[in-house]
Image (cartoon, rainbow, N blue to C red):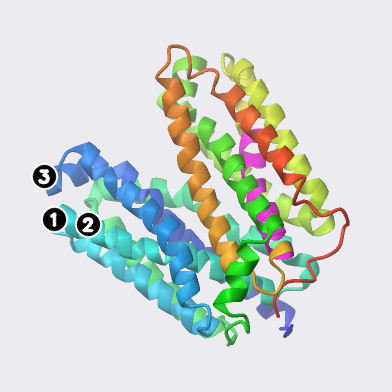
Amino acid sequence: MKSFPVKKSWLVPVVLMVSVFVVGTSEYLIAGLLPQVAADLHVSVATAGQAVTAYALGVVVGGPVVTVATVRVPRKGLALALLVVFAAGNVLCAVAGSYEVLIVGRVVASLSHAAFLTLALMVTTRVVEARRVGTAIAAVGAGFSVATLLGVPLGVLLGEDAGWRTPFAVLAGLALAVTGVLAAVLPRQEAPVTSVRDEVAAVLGRRVLVVIATTAVGLAATSTVFTYLAPALTEITGFGATAVSTLLLVYGVGSLAGGLVAGRLADRSLGATVRGTFAGLAVVLAIFPFALPWGWSAVPAVLVLGVLTSATTPVLQSLVLRHAGRAPTLAVSVNVCAFNIGIAAGSALGGGLVAVDGGLRWLGLVGAALSLGALVISYAAVPRSRDSLTSVPA
């Protein structure tokens, strides 16, 4: 593996984290602007909401396809190209004169989403020491936590004040700006020496498939509760809108801290961190329904949930890197898609339960059962030793 000076090696993950923040903000931004979009483009709010679905489908379907199609493209050029495609998609959204053009813009932007996140994680593993891979993955992944914590709320506020098109134009400008910075700091990296057949074979490996299944089930566990966290805090805990917003901020801070801490722990003992994360999630989710009725117990429960939820990202991606061996790119991309599949499945499951009288309070028990399921599945993939990630591609 080619080594880089320490300062430069950590500058690259920081710039990639900012890039991931920009890309991550785009995914959920439109959800807070649906009434404006619907009124301006003369469609129903439900129809406008399909812009969220279109992006998600683009991530799940387009991620692996784009990853496979570009597996032999030099990494630096690919990173810059993906950000330019993302910027172009957001420009289409900003100038969309019809609902159809908006959907096209969302799909175009989404095609670079999973592929860029995969590339960001892979590039990061090549510019830091192997013993710090988990920490570096967590740092890059923190871009998504910050996107949820700051990017989406700020984008929605901007859209409410300056019109829904403005945030998309700003995202396009930010994407081009980070493209310029990446062009300056990202070391030139040749494409991996693996073939498409190697990449597909790695994904179909038993342990990689087990990690992907763990990811989908584990994220379904947390999404079942998080999707309906705001109404639960309002209707069950009795918090007002301001208090709920503050608690969601607390959740975001917990997510940011949890991911970074889990990354460092994964570098020391990956197996123990995986087991501890899902066991902890099962406990806090089981307690959640009983903590919700009182503010003094709901607040720490929300904070701990945020910490443990974000801890799943670095440990699961580190597991994929370990088990995919010399051809991890497609495996990481598919695992990114598994995160989105789990989130969608958990949201749908939670929605069905909320429709049942009293179901909102007891979502945590379902989440706890799913987390225990993820813990059981993970035992087939968690390594038995504390070996470092020596299989990270050079």
Q: Please, what is the three-letter code of the amino acid marked with disc 2?
A: Leu
Residue 10, percent from left and from top: 67, 72
Q: Please, what is the three-letter code of the amino acid marked with disc 3?
A: His
Quick one: label 2 or label 3, which is nearer the N terminus? 3
Q: Looking at the image, do the residues carrying marks 3 and 1 touch, with CB atoms under 8 Å apart?
A: no
Disc sitting over residue 42 in the figure: 3
Which residue is at the front of the view, 352 or 185?
352
Who's the residue at 78% across and 51% down the image?
382
Who's the residue at 75% across and 52% down the image?
381
Image side of residue 323 versus residue 42, left or right: right
Disc sitting over residue 386 in the figure: none
Residue 178, percent from left and from top: 45, 73
Relative to 212, is 197 above or below?
below
Disc sitting over residue 98 in the figure: 1
Q: Quadrant of the C terminus?
A: bottom right
Q: CA distance from mark 2 to mark 3?
A: 12 Å
User: Toward which corner of the image does residue 200 lie, by quadrant?
Assistant: bottom right
Relative to 4, is 243 above or below?
above
Specify the farthest residue to the top: 357
Residue behind mark 2: 102
Query: What crowding class fits label 3: few (fewer than 14 Cα within 10 Å), some (14-19), or many (20 or more)?
Result: few
Which residue is at the front of the view, 132 or 298?
132
Q: Please, what is the three-letter code of the amino acid marked with disc 1?
A: Ser
Q: Is residue 143 visible?
A: no
Q: CA distance from mark 3 to mark 1?
A: 8 Å
What stretch of residues is rendered in magenta?
303-322
Image side of residue 83 versus residue 237, left or right: left
Query: What crowding class fits label 1: few (fewer than 14 Cα within 10 Å), some (14-19), or many (20 or more)?
Result: few
